[in-house]
Image (cartoon, rainbow, N blue to C red):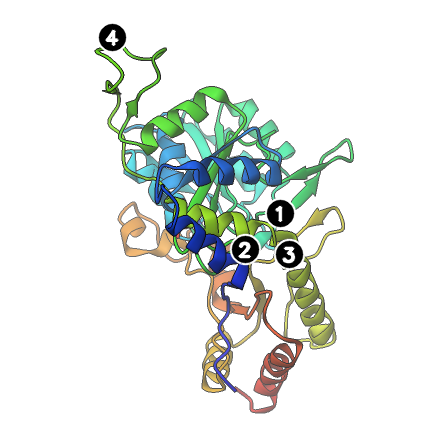
Amino acid sequence: MKAIPYGRQNITDEDIQAVVETLRSDFLTQGPKIDEFEHKFADYVGAPYAVAVNNATSGLHLAAKALGVAPGQRVLVTPMTFAASANCIRYCGGDVDFVDIDPDTYLMDERKLVAKLEAAPTGTYAGMVIVDFAGYPHNLERFREIADRFGLWIIEDACHAPGAWWTDSAGQRQLTGNCRFADCTVFSFHPVKHIATGEGGMVTTRCPKLMERLRLYRTHGITRDPALLTHNDGGWYYEMQELGFNYRLTDIQAALGISQLSRAEAGLARRQEIARRYDEAFRNVEWIRTPFRADDIYHAFHLYVIQVPDRKGLYVHLRANGVMAQVHYAPLHLMPYYRRDGWTEGSLPVVEDYYAHCLSLPMYPTLTDAEQDYVISCVKNAREFRI
Ligand SMILES: Cc1ncc(COP(=O)(O)O)c(C=O)c1O
């Protein structure tokens, strides 16, 4: 059997056709596909505005910059995430402070967040970056209450969670990225994610001012909008009003994204099915801890993470058998770069304990039942071999 990766894109003939059509069109970039992708994605997550970018790292940077992160500001970040969730703050010169995770959901621990905020002088923190880790969506109503109490903004990194929802206190379903509670939400279209464009990302928001700033910073800080120009030399004239970047997505990628988006729901449904099969297979295996489940959320299952006593042993055993399990993630506060701020082993015990035991099993829509059964039997065998 071919090696089974932990995640994989699904490219169909329709996707290829969409890309080819764009390659034959007048615009490879800055054309109509961007606008179409932004509108369709905004509709999908229920947000008024979506801004397409060349990857989620750029999207996080734009969000942090648009929210005014500057040297001297401190921002609270979960340590259970990819480096980009915290680095966006550093790009703007801000400082990162980590809050430990909840032992069930692996999201930022609300009680620890509040305790940290209460212990600090008013105004210590400017905002927070929270991450819907593995696809488990935050109850953003509760995080918004905390944010409002302490005057913070919220960037939600939903790179793992397009299509997820949670339930608010009125019993209403809230789609991840609709920005009713977060200021900005950021998505990734890296190939292992739900929607693949090679590289790519999207930032959603409900705030017109933020949307304008995101667009401005995405293209060098340049505007052509006559209403915003300081003066107007003629039809060709534009102004660079801020120091921005080139963080644009191409139309080629947007065409692929639009085609992928049309299958997003089907992909999510298949991920649910795979998760249910894993849950079922490991239900009575006392040494495997499966992901936390709740009825009032819809988990996007970017990752299916188990916890086991001997993670390294299981990792080696699975790899030797062609199952490319992965570890998500080594905690961010223990990366050499962030250790320079004084973080060490023991600083955040819950996330460190999680890291010692976690392993992500293959999870992607085209994983077949036969492949999954093979993965399951390899995992279960590992114990017999006393790994
Ligand atoms: C949680 C999270 N945030 C941000 C990123 C960065 O995404 P991108 O590769 O699109 O820049 C990733 C990608 O792995 C991620 O998993």
> What secondary structure is found at the residue carrying circle 4?
loop
Q: Are marks 3 and 4 in contact (CB under 8 Å)?
A: no
Q: Are marks 3 and 2 in contact (CB under 8 Å)?
A: yes
Residue at (57% x, 85% y) in the render:
382
Disc 2 residue: CB within 8 Å of ligand 1:
no
Earlier along the polypeptide chain: callout 4 or callout 1? 1
The residue at which mark 1 appears reads as: 163
What whole-number distance in Å separates the C-alpha atoms at marks 1 and 3?
7 Å
Tell me if mark 1 has few (under 14), some (14-19) or many (20+) residues whose alpha carbon lies within 10 angstroms of its own.
many
Residue at (58% x, 52% y) in the render:
135
Q: What mark, if any, has residue 194 been given in the picture? A: 2
Pick the front one: 375 or 54: 54
Q: Are marks 1 and 3 in contact (CB under 8 Å)?
A: yes
Please say whether residue 376 is visible from this viewpoint: yes
Circle nearer the viewer, 4 or 1: 4
Earlier along the polypeptide chain: callout 3 or callout 4? 4
Identity, as a three-letter code, of the amino acid under mark 1: Gly
Please say whether residue 348 is visible from this viewpoint: no
Q: Are marks 1 and 2 in contact (CB under 8 Å)?
A: yes
Tell me if mark 3 has few (under 14), some (14-19) or many (20+) residues whose alpha carbon lies within 10 angstroms of its own.
many
Asked where in the image residue 206 lies, by quadrant, the reply is: top right
